[in-house]
Image: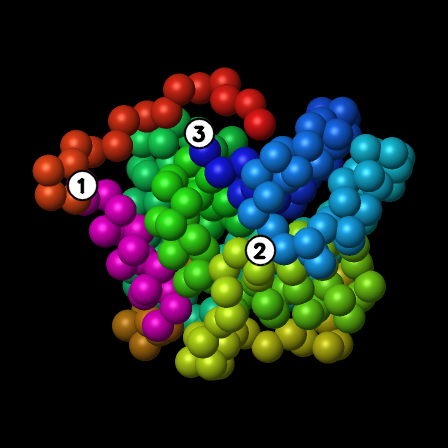
Amino acid sequence: MTKTLKVLSAMLSYPDEMLAAASAELAQALDEERLLPADVRPPLDALIEEIGCADVYDLQERYVELFDRTRSLSLHLFEHVHGESRDRGQAMIDLKLLYEQAGLKLSAGELPDFLPAFLEYLSRLPLAEALNLLRDTAHILRALSERLQSRKSPYEAVFRALEALAGPPSEEAAAELVPEDPNADPNDFAALDEAWEEEAVSFGPDAAPACKERLIAQIRAGRRPAAGRPAANPAAKGETL
């Protein structure tokens, strides 16, 4: 298990008392594994400390404002590429099956392309395989990092750490991103609901972004065991950092 990916997954999850209580454990896991460059650790450690010390309701309000009400900061990976591939539904099913094979059960209503779930899954893979899949999302990670930086959000630190692990994105992939709407108001709930309802899922033959197709292909390839290698068995439950 790659503890660093598990820690970053936890830090992008909805903050609660359990996460706050585990803050020291999160930092310790990063110290033990030493996967991250030294320059990304100070802001990451500051966010971990804040999660452990700040009022949990303030943390939750900030999280909702950023990631739930601001579509350009959505933690659902497929929201950040143009259009909706006709293969998206099957890719979601395939990804969910992979999670289950790795012993990862999604909570009710949680979609497989939710970044914390994806990182939790990657943490259970061999490191090289995990980083190869993470690299397919590098352009999304960079965009989210820059958007959070413009808001002076401490969550930028998590995406800088993920960028360091994923490596630089390709120009081709970066061109596929949905641009941020500078006029979007995260507190305009009627407009927010309308936007999500209109564009949430649309399976059409005209939309098949390369980034999404690469990720779909890798997801499907992950279901096929390599020659001479048995299919993955579900991992033991109850793992800790």
* Amino acid type assigned to the residue bearing label 1 in the image: Pro
Q: Earlier in the sequence, mark 2 or mark 3?
A: 3
Residue occupying image coordinates x 81% and y 46%:
46
Residue occupying image coordinates x 44% and y 19%:
237
The circle on residue 225 is: 1
The image position of residue 164, as x and y in percent, is 57, 60
* Amino acid type assigned to the residue bearing label 3 in the image: Lys
Q: Quadrant of residue 9?
A: top right
Q: Which residue is mark 2?
A: 162
Q: Earlier in the sequence, mark 1 or mark 2?
A: 2
* Amino acid type assigned to the residue bearing label 2 in the image: Leu
Question: Residues in magenta?
Answer: 210-225
- Is residue 97 on the magenta stretch? no
Q: Is residue 7 above or below residue 134?
A: above
- Give the main secondary structure of the magenta stretch: helix
The image position of residue 134, as x and y in percent, is 45, 55
Q: Is residue 241 above or below residue 208?
A: above
For numbered disc 2, what is the local secondary structure? helix
* Tag 3–tag 1 contact (CB < 8 Å): no
Q: Which residue is mark 3?
A: 105
Q: Earlier in the sequence, mark 3 or mark 1?
A: 3
Q: CA distance from mark 2 to mark 3?
A: 23 Å
- Whether residue 160 is visible, yes or no, is yes
Q: Is residue 65 above or below residue 205?
A: above
Q: CA distance from mark 3 to mark 1?
A: 21 Å
